[in-house]
Image (cartoon, grey):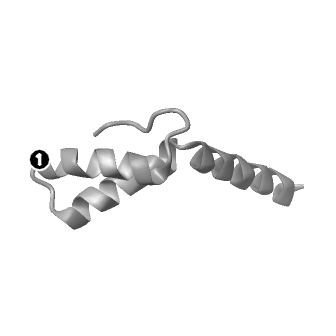
């Protein structure tokens, strides 16, 4: 499964990733889920959200 490129939009990544997973034998739903999950995890947006969640956890412990 390909990784998102720096500054790649979600739409561009999904349009690149989904056909690859379908060629590997995944269903359309599996391909969408796998690619979206990977984009969310590796994208700048996903990293920022994880950082915010980590900060909130630290602040809530104080």
Residue extending farthest to the top is 6
Quarter of the figure that contains the C terminus: bottom right
Quarter of the figure that contains the N terminus: top left
Q: Is residue 6 above or below residue 31?
A: above
Q: Residue 25, image x and y in percent?
A: 9, 52
Left/right placement of residue 17 relative to residue 11 reads left
The residue carrying mark 1 is: 23
Image quadrant in which you'd find residue 16: top left
| Residue displayed at 83% across by 60% down | 60
| Residue displayed at 20% across by 63% down | 28
Image quadrant in which you'd find residue 59: bottom right
Looking at this view, is 11 or 1 the one in front?
11
Q: Residue 2, image x and y in percent?
A: 32, 37
State the SS at label 1: helix
| Residue displayed at 46% across by 34% down | 5
Q: Is residue 7 above or below residue 36?
A: above
């Amino acid at each position: 499964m390909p990784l998102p490129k720096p500054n790649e939009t979600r739409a561009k990544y999904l349009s690149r990733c989904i056909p690859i997973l379908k060629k590997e034998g995944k269903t359309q739903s599996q391909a969408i889920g796998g690619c979206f999950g990977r984009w969310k995890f590796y994208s700048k947006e996903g990293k920022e959200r994880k950082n915010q969640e980590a900060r909130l956890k630290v602040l809530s412990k104080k």
